[in-house]
Image: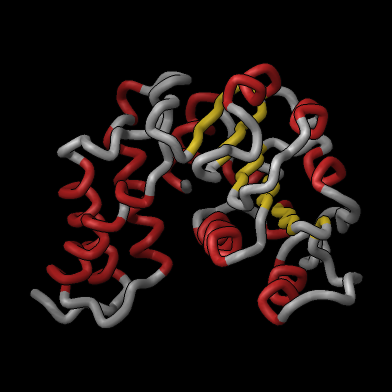
């Protein structure tokens, strides 16, 4: 996901720290995506997470401990920018990026309310939160979790190389730095040939796993968690 976002903003000449990002879904995937976004340079105050009951913020009284943690670290909690409330349409109003990991359908009019040249990653399978044909009417760049549409975001792009790199370095843990390095390596595989229908490498691209493994091992050494040479 972070690799796709990095290449998408390169195509659009945007800076990651300036993005307003909405994550639709606050389960395990949504929490992991949110943490990765912040580790990768997105301003936490400009990340809004929404679940089936609406936007997550500190004023809600129905938050689980994990969602309370999200409320304390995102959506203006750091004091920079307003605290968003309401539903998914409110969250998406003027947003630059939508990352869907919920499986729930997002109305077209909500996507239409995003900022110009938006980015939509509708990753639910088998039915994306918003069909890519609909998303493309309103967003500049679209990716899904499916292989039958362009720009498939699939965790198989990361896992083999991350494990290989961690094993090669005999890493004692997997750090955020190692994860970000993996994303940068994935993005770099297609960095010289980016276009709207190909800003994510194919999961079958033989260059991906070795590039990720090398980057992850180096990051492990840099982060001081490597036991290998």
Residue 193: percent from the left, percent from the top? 32, 21
Extreme residue in the front direction: 126
Question: In the image, what residue occupies the spot 28% across and 78% down?
Answer: 224
Residue 163: percent from the left, percent from the top? 23, 65
Question: In the image, what residue occupies the spot 65% across and 25% down?
Answer: 135
Q: Is residue 93 left or right of residue 44?
A: right
Task: Quadrant for residue 57, please give it.
Answer: bottom right
Near-viewer residue (181 or 209): 209
Viewport quadrant of the C terminus:
bottom left
Q: Is residue 224 left or right of residue 28?
A: left
Near-viewer residue (138 or 180): 138
Q: Is residue 79 above or below residue 200?
A: below
Question: In the image, what residue occupies the spot 40% across and 27% down?
Answer: 148
Q: Is residue 27 above or below residue 130?
A: below
Residue 132: percent from the left, percent from the top? 58, 26
Question: In the image, what residue occupies the spot 70% across and 69% down?
Answer: 70
> How is colour applied across the structure in the image?
secondary structure
Task: Quadrant for residue 203, please give it.
Answer: top left
């Amino acid at each position: 996901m972070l690799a796709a976002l990095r290449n998408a903003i390169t195509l659009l000449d945007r800076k990651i720290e300036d993005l307003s990002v909405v994550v639709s879904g606050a389960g395990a995937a949504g929490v992991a995506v949110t943490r990765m976004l912040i580790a990768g340079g997105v301003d936490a105050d400009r990340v809004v997470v929404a679940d089936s009951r609406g936007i997550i913020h500190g004023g809600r009284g129905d938050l689980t401990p994990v969602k309370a943690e999200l409320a304390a670290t995102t959506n203006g909690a750091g004091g920079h920018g307003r605290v968003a409330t309401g539903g998914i349409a409110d969250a998406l109003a003027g947003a630059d990026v939508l990352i869907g990991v919920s499986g729930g359908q997002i109305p077209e009019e909500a996507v239409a309310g995003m900022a110009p040249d938006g980015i939509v990653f509708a990753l639910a399978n088998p039915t994306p939160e918003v069909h890519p044909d609909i998303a493309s009417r309103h967003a500049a760049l679209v990716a899904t979790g499916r292989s039958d549409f362009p720009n498939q975001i699939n965790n198989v792009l990361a896992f083999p190389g991350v494990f290989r790199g961690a094993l090669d370095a005999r890493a004692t843990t997997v750090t955020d730095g190692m994860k970000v390095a993996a994303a940068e390596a994935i993005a770099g595989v297609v960095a010289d040939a980016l276009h709207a229908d190909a800003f994510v490498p194919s999961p079958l691209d033989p260059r991906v796993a070795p590039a990720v493994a090398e980057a992850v091992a180096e990051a492990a050494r840099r982060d001081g968690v490597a036991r290998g040479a």
